[in-house]
Amino acid sequence: MKEILDFIVLFSSVLWEAMPFIVLGAVVAGVLEEYLPQQLITRFLPKQVLPAVMIGGVLGLLFPMSSAGSWW
């Protein structure tokens, strides 16, 4: 029984800690989807897969949407 209560406490604490980042990520994604044309984004990304993935990885480091990505 103690293990179940520990799991519930840990799970809810992680959920509450991550919730602001999840909401922020959803809001940023919604704003970008609504106001930034997709053609503008694809014009700046390379056509090859590997460079595009690398740019996405760097942008993920610069703009983390969860506490797991906040390494600094």
Image (spheres, rainbow, N blue to C red):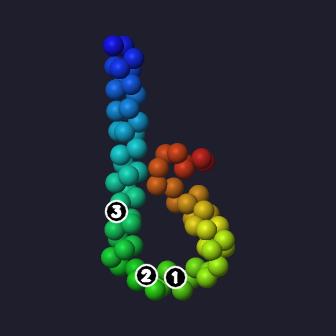
Q: Which residue is mark 1?
A: 42
Seen at 51% across and 55% down, the residue is 64
Residue 25 visible within the image: yes
The answer to whether 7 appears left or right of 69 in the picture is left
Dot label at residue 16: none
Kindly check if marks 2 and 1 are in contact, taking CB atoms under 8 A apart as contact: yes
Q: Position of residue 72 (x, y in %)?
A: 60, 48
Seen at 35% across and 46% down, the residue is 19
Q: Amino acid at mark 1?
A: Thr
Q: Amino acid at mark 2?
A: Gln
Q: Residue furthest top?
A: 1
Q: Amino acid at mark 3?
A: Val
Q: Which residue is mark 2?
A: 38
Q: Which residue is mark 3?
A: 27
Please tell me which of labels 3 and 2 falls first in the chain.
Answer: 3
Which element type, helix, strand or loop, lies under badge 2? helix
Q: Nearer the viewer, residue 8 or 18?
A: 8
